[in-house]
Image (spheres, rainbow, N blue to C red):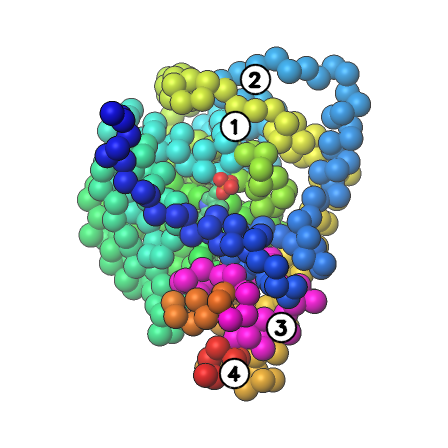
Amino acid sequence: MSWFSGVQQGPPIEVFALTKQFTEDSFPQKVNLGVGAYRSDEGKPWVLPVVRIAEKALANDDSLNKEYLPVLGLEIFSSLSTKMLLGEDSPALTQNKAFGVQCLSGTGALRVGAEFLARKLEKTVFYFSKPTWGNHRLVFLSAGFQDAREYRYWNGETRGLDIDGFLEDLNNAPEGAVIILHACAHNPTGCDPTQEQWKQIASVIKDKKLFPFFDSAYQGFASGDLDKDAWAVRYFVTQGFELFCAQSYAKNFGLYNERTGNLSVVMNNPSEVPAVKSQITLTVRGMYSNPPSHGARIVSHVLSNKELYNQWRDNIKTMSSRIIEMRKRLREELERLGTPGSWNHITDQIGMFSYTGLNEAQSEHMVKKHHIYMLKSGRISMCGLTPSNVEYVAKSINETLST
Ligand code: PMP
């Protein structure tokens, strides 16, 4: 007998399955445009130089030990992270209305926030953009939400934001629904609302009494400027919203496997902060008890040292400028080859990802024929494009669309 005979095979997780296929592929010119991880000009994983510096300093610091961190994580890390998101002199911080919780990267911060909302505030309905990052749905349903709904976001014809559909769907949402919003560099479309559009979105969220839950996985990646990329969240705070924001250091610090993130909580009433903190403490205690320290120490070391902080900003600039440069090169190459269709969306979109417009069959052809690994939705990670492979990728897209 087996307890497990009724377990059915689950579907593979597309982006991890692609990376596995890529690793096993022996084709010399293979390119991985699936996973959102930055690669050096030579196509190799890149550890940020400032991270190497911080790690050396930590290794030499004999005062550090392996004792447990508090349940809510390293205090200095979470407060610096919330400050980075909200800005030095945010009224939410000066009035003690905001705090951070160290979490297991962005995913963990979403999960902790969602668990709290589902179990303590008894929220059941959440909305995510159509399309969105492939994990929002699973994280929120696993946390206890019951009703997953989409709001319109992407207009495939104009290859831009469907702001009217977006606002209409928010307008029809039930009071109290949780709205997941990408803080910047929307994944997968690379298309963000303008500031004017954010104001419209905020106004509907306020009128309809919805709860904004920002997902900030790419601060610094959209514009190369940490403050600019936090504009939407800061705007909501100035408008008096209570909100959550999940922050990830996977991309902007390159700490993918260190699982380093923060849940920023902004509330209206400082006297309610201790109760909320105590409940989040129990939420975390029941899930994983307390977080790991290494990534949080790296980030704290850098954020608390002016010189290293500036170096980090330079490292982000290196990544974001390469991405912008690659967008330009890819578009130029496609246009030079006379590839069918228009390609301005490649340079109009921002951040780590681009929605190429290739359909499922074409995307699969790219994988099978050209060994260029990309999602079926046509999404490519711009971080995987480098000066040494951009021509090959453009040629392959051209071949795919011309046959
Ligand atoms: N949100 C979005 C929109 C993302 O793209 C990602 C990473 N791909 C995450 C959250 C979470 O990433 P991580 O858990 O690695 O920080």
Residue 196 against residue 234 in the figure, above or below: below
Going by the numbered disc 1, the residue's amino acid type is Gln
Quarter containing the C terminus: bottom left
Circle 1 sits in a helix, a strand or a loop, which is it? strand
Q: Are marks 4 and 2 in contact (CB under 8 Å)?
A: no
Residue most toward the bottom?
A: 338
Could you say which quadrant of the image residue 179 lies in? top left
Going by the numbered disc 3, the residue's amino acid type is Tyr
Circle 4 sits in a helix, a strand or a loop, which is it? loop
Q: Picture coordinates of residue 200 (x, y %)?
A: 35, 56
- How many numbered discs, if any? 4
User: Which residue position holds label 1?
Assistant: 102
Name the N-terminal-most of marks 2 and 1: 2
| Identity of the residue drawn at 61% across and 78% down | 333
Q: Picture coordinates of residue 69 (x, y %)?
A: 56, 17
Q: In this picture, which residue range is highlighted in magenta? A: 369-397
Q: Is 168 inside the magenta-drawn segment?
A: no
Label 4 CA crowd tier, 10 Å (few <14, some 14–19, many 20+): some
Please say whether residue 276 is visible from this viewpoint: no
Dot label at residue 392:
3
Please say whether residue 82 is visible from this viewpoint: yes
Circle 3 sits in a helix, a strand or a loop, which is it? helix
| Identity of the residue drawn at 74% across and 33% down | 54
Q: Are marks 2 and 1 in contact (CB under 8 Å)?
A: yes
Between circles 4 and 1, the one closer to the viewer is 4
Mark 4 and mark 1: Cα distance apart in space: 46 Å
Label 1 CA crowd tier, 10 Å (few <14, some 14–19, many 20+): many
User: Which residue position holds label 2?
Assistant: 69
User: Which residue position holds label 4?
Assistant: 339
Q: Picture coordinates of residue 150 (x, y %)?
A: 28, 52
Going by the numbered disc 2, the residue's amino acid type is Leu
